[in-house]
Every structure is written in structure tokens, then in C-alpha cells.
Image (cartoon, coloured by chain):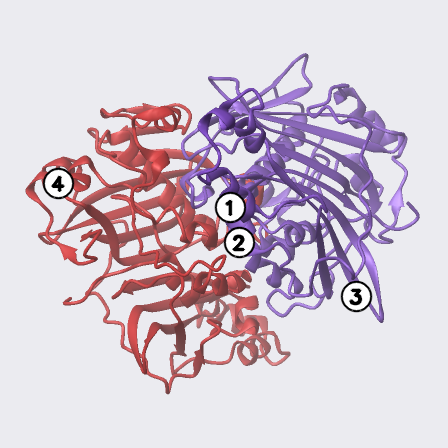
Chain colours: A purple, B red
Amino acid sequence: MAHTLSSTIYCSRVLIRSERGRQHRSNAAVRVNGAAHRTPLQVGSALETSINRSLPELSAPLLASPPLLTTDGHEGSRQNIPTEKQVEDPFRQAQIVEGGVRYQQTVVVRSYEVGPDKTATLETVLNLLQETALNHVWMSGLLGDGFGATHGMIKNNLIWVVSRMHVQVDHYPIWGEVLQIDTWVGSSGKNGMRRDWLISGRDSGNVFARATSTWVMMNKNTRRLSKMPEEVKAEISPWYIDRHAIQEEATEKIIKLDSNAKHVDSNLKTIPDQFLQHHQLNNIILEYRKECGISDVVQSICQPDEDMVSPGENFNMVRGPLLLPEIINGHHNLAGALQQWTTKYTHLLQLKAGDEYEEIVRGRTTWKKKL
Amino acid sequence: MAHTLSSTIYCSRVLIRSERGRQHRSNAAVRVNGAAHRTPLQVGSALETSINRSLPELSAPLLASPPLLTTDGHEGSRQNIPTEKQVEDPFRQAQIVEGGVRYQQTVVVRSYEVGPDKTATLETVLNLLQETALNHVWMSGLLGDGFGATHGMIKNNLIWVVSRMHVQVDHYPIWGEVLQIDTWVGSSGKNGMRRDWLISGRDSGNVFARATSTWVMMNKNTRRLSKMPEEVKAEISPWYIDRHAIQEEATEKIIKLDSNAKHVDSNLKTIPDQFLQHHQLNNIILEYRKECGISDVVQSICQPDEDMVSPGENFNMVRGPLLLPEIINGHHNLAGALQQWTTKYTHLLQLKAGDEYEEIVRGRTTWKKKL
């Protein structure tokens, strides 16, 4: 990777367009409040899932050196960032477990975090990943500023950027559901860090979602990737566990789409509404290539897999009079197959740079039919 | 009020346009995912502040009879709605205090709830009002469905609608700040209920925000206002306290704007970006007149008060070389006056009905200059 990595929630938000109709927000990312400055992503050691942040935040928590997040001064004391490792945070209902490395927090799904079907939106899931990751760093005593940078990173002018994110949602939790979110970090190559999450029912233990991500360091002034300084490695490596929330097979390479793709849209709306109404996102992988800012002009491209059957056709076929219950429920297990029936899309978000386009992020999503 | 009252967050969201750049979302409210059905507001006994809900929710939690929110069935048990009054909810860190009527919850401002300046957005404040109100009903054992309707209301086919909302934000809390939110209800005329809130620092006790609201009942099928049945009055009146979070003088009447107003916009963007960048909303009053749905075409109108000085002029004047510190800090107390210097707007959101417009909501906002 010779170029600068990036994230920007914006990009991914545009790419996936939540199945719950949040796509209209994406326009705002292009130009928020008329501000024309670039706002490159600054993320937490733990941090900023970058798939989700709501738009207004885009232009801000991403800025360097936020004045309110110093540990000295009035606001700093209000924020109360610990300077030493804590094992318990009663207000966040959090604790450090497993020999002091894994962070665990209890969270109740709130009334405003659910969508039309009264289940948590993807945005909520991603918000909670970000929140718990940042709280993990917060409790570790390593937090040097508001977005997960450690003291060593701040000294070296480094910020975290996400290079890859993979989220798998088996079930979306409902309003009022009490969740337990676990998160931990591990090494990723010489200069990277991985962070994994597991969201489960606090009582049932049932898994709702799993996620893994890869983070690298960027110099916040030059916007170039950086090696991880020994000083920083010494800070974070004691927290490493070698455990994977998602058992990924050999990482599937996401192909690069071009303008021959089925859906090309500079209004950033690529997955058809009709499809979104009847499907639920259950897997998303994002590979970040370049950063982009709020005033950049971007284009979203999306291509369904070729073997995809039209959802309408499929649905009618199953419900049609020709299929006897015996067939549906027989040993061919068509019903089961249909429940598992998924649709896959490949995505690309590109940045318009003169007459050319530069890749910002590639994506791959899997959708399940709502039955 | 001969006509149907309404709320819809949408309306108010459009009206005020958060100072943090969330205005772009408003378009989505007009048409979400191509759905063309009306989604009238259904709100909680406590409920739905209606100023804030994020867009996707608009098309949904507002629907009647949500299948996931029955108290029987699998999801119902996952949601765990109490059928009797509880005095403590450990997961929500909540308790019923003051002789069993006032609800009190501890909340930590999360990383994704803050804006560019690392302080909670207005949307966050409003989300928390909604959340605590619904949790209050939840803990009361009265909750019959997901949006605050009591058992008696469900039996009578009634839903809550907000007729007036007044929020006053003295200070916006910052990320990580530990808040205590208190909320309680009282009577409002023969057929209404008021709900008040107080948001303060958990340790400091400093008040961040206060709010009051008025709620009435609507038949969910006829969409007409209803008297409060004795059965419902009997359910909720034991919870009434006569206490006001905001000491309102004689309620100022909000004038009705017409198309001669300074800012008229069918793209729902009326307050200038330039203004929003330098000001913070500190008071908003909304009077709801009629409901509107997601496919309705609306128009937003806004008028600054006549005695308003241009913020730019004012700012330059103060910072200019001609003002000596003695003058600024002198007994005329110009600095203090400027800190208190506010700008007021009157708002109107109307619904296009044929060739005419019908009022949806009138609003009045007060903004403070960020210093």
C-alpha cells in the first residue's frame, strides 16, 4: 500500500446505504454547513468504526487536537479521562476481564436506536462498536486525546486510521434488549493492530454480531502512513490477545469495479430502494484505500453478483401454488435454503480528482431476505 | 383546536435545522425509501420528544401495533417490559424517587453523540428526553406497547401526540460527561398531560438543560383528538406532580408567518449556514397543529426578529481596536451583555394541500453566539 489509507465513515455510509433509509444523509457529507476544508479521518486506538458515524460528527471529532479533550482544564476534568488503568467503570457499566485485557460493557438498546422494525439499526451496531472501543482505551489509562490516540502517539503526531473493517450481524437486537459487548485488541503484522468485538445477549449469551478491524498509524500532518514506534508498541502490546471474533477463511479479495457496473451514481445512492425494503444487511467488509474530505466529490458504484436471482421472482416462486408444503419442508430443505438465501454486492467509492477517479474504499456486502 | 394535532419529529427537525449540520437529513423525511404511505406520529405517554428522532425511525416506530412489542411472544420476553411498577432498573441505571413518581437515570454522553465541538448535539439532548420518558413509563408497569401507550389507551385505540414542546439548553454536555436526567409528569387541563425534564451533572448538580411538553390523546384510526378516558386518567394521574422544570411566564404566542418572511424554502433549509456555524441553539418552542406524513410536500419558513444585528458586524465591533478592555469589562458590562446576546427566529412548517398550505408546526428559537 503505497498510498495513504483512509476511512471516513462517510465513504462507507455511502457505500452501503443502510437498509433503513439513511441514505439521504450521505449527501451532507459532501458538503456540511458549507465548510470546504478537508476533514481527514482521525480515529481512536480503539476506535471509530468509521462505518457509522452520523454526519455532523464527520466534520469534527475527526479534527486534530480537539480543545475539549485535554486532560487538564475544566472540560478535561469534566470528561474525567483516567490516567491509570481502571478495572471497573460503574457509570458505563463496564469492566476489564480476562486477566486485565478484555473490555466488557453492558448496554441497553435505546428507543431512538431502533428502526422501522423496532430492531437496532446497523448504524446503532456500529456506534456501539465505536463506543466500546473508545471506552476500552479510556479505561486502559492510555488515552491521550479524545479519539483513542495514546500518549506515545500524540508525542509522535500519530493518529489511528482503519484499513479494514468486517462486521457480521447474525441478528439485530430489539429495543430494550440488554446486550453485553466484548472487545479486545491483537497484533496485525508489524505495524498494525486488530480490534475484535462480540455483541451478545447479556443473559442468553446468544451472539448478535461479530466484528473485526485492522488499524494502522498515520502522521496527522503529512497524512502518510507510519510505522508503529516502539514506544507505542510498548504501550499497547500488553493488551494484545490472539483471538478472532470472526473465523475468516483466506481473505477474499474484493475486485475493483469500473463504470460498467450495474449501478453508478454520483448521488451516492446505488442499491435500489425496492431491494432495501425487503433485505437486511448481514455482512459487510470494507477495505479503505485513501482518505477523503467533506468537500470532495465522490461517486458510488455497486454491482450485484451475477448469479443473483431477482428477489421478487424468487419470492413469488416460493409462495406460488406449485410448491407443495412437502416440497418446501422436504428433505431438500428448500425452506431452509431460502432462509439462508443471500444476495451479494461489490461496492466501490471513488474520489473525483480532475478527470480521473481514485479509489477511496472497496466494499463487499451480503444481504438476507427478510422473511 | 378544531383540527388534528400532530408532531412528527420531521417537522421540527426541518424547522430548526441543527446548528451542527444535520439539516441535510430533512429531505429524507419527505420520502424515505420510496415509501408513500403516511406515517402519522405515534408517541409515548412519556414520549417521543418529536424534535429529534433520526430519520429512519420516522417511517417506523411511529407505525401502530408494532409486532415486536407485544408482551407475549419471544420478542416481548426479550424486551422484558414490566407489568408492575419497578423502583429500580440496574441496566438502565434508573430509579423511581420522590415518593415513587419521579424517574431518575444516569447517562454517560457517548462518543457518537457529540458534534464537531465535542459537545452533545441538540439531537442527543432530545434523544435522551425521549429515552428517559419512555423508560419512565416502562418502569411504571403501565406500558402497553412500545411507544408509551398505557393498557387503557390500547384498549381505547388511543395514542399520545405532542402538542407543545419547549426545550432550553443552558450548556451542552461534553463527551464522557456523566449526567443525571430527571423526568416527571403532571396534569395539563382536563385532557392533557405535561412532561418535564431536568438534565444535570450527576456530581456537580449543574443544570445543562430543562424541558417541558404537553401531550394529548388521538384516536389512532380516525386521527382525531380524543378526551382522556377516565380509565386512562386513573392509570396515569397517580404519577402527577405539580412542578415545572421551566418557569414560563405567560406563554408567548407564536405568530403565524406568511410567504413574505425572509427565508422561504421548500428544500427545508432556512437558517443560513453562516449563522449556524457561529451560533448555538439555546431555546426552542414548538407548537404542533397538524400531522404530516413522510410523502407529504412541505415548506419551511423562517423569520429573524427585526432588531437582530448581523452577527458578523457585532463580532467585529467587539474585537475591533476601538474597544478598550476597560470598556468591554467596565461597569456597562458589555462583555456580559454580548455573552447574553441572543438572536431569535420565528418558524413555520406548512403542508402543501392542493393550492393551499396548512400549518403543521409553528416554532420559535433563540440562539446564542458561540464565544
The residue identified by callout 4 is B232
Q: Residues within 10 Å of mark 1 (few under 14, many from 20)?
A: some
Query: In the visual, does B308 lie left or right of A35?
Result: left
Kindly give the residue lying farthest to the left in the view shown: B230
Asked if badges 3 and 1 are on one and the same chain, I answer: yes
The secondary structure type at the circle numbered 1 is helix
**Residue at 17% from the left image edge and 42% from the top image edge:** B153
Among the two numbered marks 2 and 3 on one chain, the one whose residue lies closer to the N terminus: 2
**Residue at 50% from the left image edge and 49% from the top image edge:** A277
The residue identified by callout 3 is A352
- B115 to B183, vertically: above or below: below
Gap between marks 2 and 3 measured at Cα: 28 Å
Gap between marks 1 and 2 measured at Cα: 7 Å
The residue identified by callout 1 is A278
Residue B121 position, x and y percent, is 50, 53
Query: In the visual, does A302 lie left or right of B138?
Result: right
Gap between marks 3 and 1 measured at Cα: 32 Å
Question: Of residues B212 and B297, which is closer to you in this image?
Answer: B297
The secondary structure type at the circle numbered 3 is strand
- Marks 1, 4: nearer the viewer: 1
The residue identified by callout 2 is A274
Gap between marks 4 and 2 measured at Cα: 41 Å
Mark 1 touching mark 4, by CB under 8 A? no
Q: Chain of mark 1?
A: A
- B128 to A336, vertically: above or below: below
Give the quarter of the image for residue B325.
bottom right
